[in-house]
Image: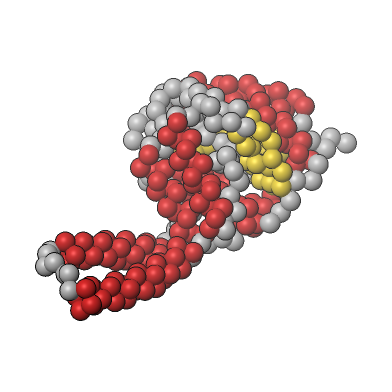
Amino acid sequence: MDDRMNVSFVIPCYNEEDVLPITIPKLLKELEKLRNKDVNKTLVYLVDDGSTDRTWDIIDRLSDECEFVVGVKLSRNCGHQRALLAGLNIAEGEAVISMDADLQDDITIVHQMVEEYRKGSEIVYAVRDDRTTDSFFKRQTALLFYRVMAWLGAEVIHNHADFRLMGRRSLDQLKTFKEVNLFLRGMIPLLGFKSTKVTYQRGERAAGESKYPIRKMLALAVDGITSFSVRPLRLVALMGIGFAFAAMIQLGWIFYVKYSLDTAIPGWASTLIPITFFGGVQLFCLGLVGEYIGKIYQETKQRPSFIIEKITKEKSQ
């Protein structure tokens, strides 16, 4: 009896007209080897996240030319995490592998991921074994991010992005998460299923530009921190207590200088500096609290995370 499994791939795409004609043929060629060894059927879901270039036209054409390619068009740009979730929610098969369109992720380790799944791991994380291809700034900020997330108590896999295999059980449970502010790298470890890791070396981007500039990386980091820990709010409270205590000490010192030493010199610095400092601290704390309140506001609306406008092929019956 043929016990080979069905595996799907989910690839979010945003303005990838330069890279798709290069990477998809490579991916399909690798998947042909996979079908000959471990897998009965593979489908590749290309999720267009509201691209403004010819990305959807290319996806539509690839879907017509190849029976294994399914195009999914979102009604607008929703962001990488939501586009990825849209693909995970509709993908068929016993297991689904998510990866980026630029194929910087090493597709040759897919067979290892499938093998680990067969051994009993419900989730298989692909983890970079080094970051030598990154700039010094990106390496250091990534290291800082993982350290901060670990300190905050969030379960985040070090040097892992969104290149992973998920079995059907974990995918079904992921659908029960209804939060709007998505940070899948933190949500998926919360599922608690048996998992393992495989390592790979990340390559250079085949063409085009990265869709994760510093601004988006910082936004993702803020989402991750504020979505998985209330410790920053506790730090704000402790900070307030600390500054109140420091103010009482300063007040005592002022009285001591004025009435005991009689050496107080009139000036604006002793007034202006504390006001400016504490004013900045207050604005920071209000901004942090506002970030959490804003997330609560978004969650209470219960708006859909994405709207699918079109799917090029109907689901298998």
| Residue occupying the point 55% across, 41% down | 161
Quarter of the figure that contains the N terminus: top right
In the image, 266: left or right of 3? left
Q: Nearer the viewer, residue 172 or 192?
A: 192
- Residue 58, image x and y in percent? 44, 27
225 above or below 128? below
176 on left or right of 15: right
Rendered image quadrant of residue 301: bottom left
Relative to the observer, which residue lies in front, 197 or 37?
197
Question: Which residue shows up at 53% across the image and 27% down it?
Answer: 132
Q: Quadrant of the C terminus?
A: top right
Q: Judge by depth and name the residue closer to the eye, 165 or 190.
A: 190
Give the x, y percent position of residue 192.
68, 56
Q: Position of residue 186 (x, y in %)?
A: 56, 52
Q: Is residue 95 visible?
A: no
Residue in the image at 45% along x and 59% along y: 226
Q: What color scheme is it?
A: secondary structure
| Residue positioned most to the front | 261
Name the residue: 57% across, 39% down.
Answer: 159
